[in-house]
Amino acid sequence: MNPLSPLACRLIAIALMAGGAMAVAMAQTERRSTQVWRCGPEGRELRDAPCPESGAGTPGQQRIDYDQPSSAQSAEARRIAAREAKLARELERDRQRLEAQQARQQQAIGIHGRGKQSPPPDAAQGAASAPPKPLKTKKPKTHKPKPPQTNANTSG
């Protein structure tokens, strides 16, 4: 495969476009803040309303800043995501079509990357015309047990 095939170039272009769009979207977010109340015995419970057990002047109130995208930015992000999803599906179909075409064009590969070797023409014809020979099976040999060794010097 060519190191920079058209498919690879498309994927690189998509990645660069997505990175650029993300940088623009991050630069255009609005800075917002909200009030948060810390409740509970150690202030570990966060609420968006005053704590029910505390009085009005409790110092548990804090402000938290966060970035919130505008509705236009959210709509643009959805359009970009839909366009990229459509392009990804097209690229996948192209890749599958290309792989199927390459599989049809390639010949079968044997051991060590070499193509399968065909037998010589005369051997192939001779093997096809001769009837198959039946397999001969041999019976396993049984060994006779050795006679017991006797002691020549028996004292009695």
Image (cartoon, rainbow, N blue to C red):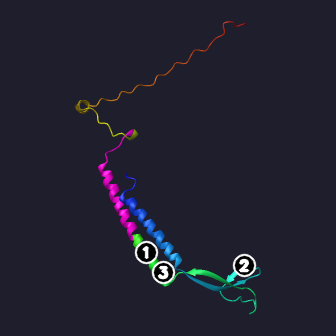
Query: Which image quarter: residue 48?
Result: bottom right
Numbered range of the magenta stretch: 86-111
Residue behind mark 3 = 73
N-term mark: 3 or 2: 2
Query: Does 116 lie within the magenta span?
Result: no
Tell me the residue that label 2 is attached to.
44
Q: Could you say which is closer to the camera, residue 100 or residue 4?
A: 4
Q: Which numbered disc covers residue 117?
A: none
Q: CA distance from mark 2 to mark 1?
A: 39 Å
Does dot 3 land on a helix, a strand or a loop?
Answer: helix
The amino acid on which the numbered mark 1 sits, given as a three-letter code, is: Ile
Q: Position of residue 69 (x, y in %)?
A: 53, 81
Image quadrant occupied by the C terminus: top right
C-alpha distance separating marks 3 and 2? 34 Å
Q: Earlier in the sequence, mark 2 or mark 1?
A: 2
Q: Main SS of the magenta segment?
A: helix
Q: Are marks 3 and 2 in contact (CB under 8 Å)?
A: no
Q: Callout 3: 10 Å neighbours few (<14), some, many (20+)?
A: some
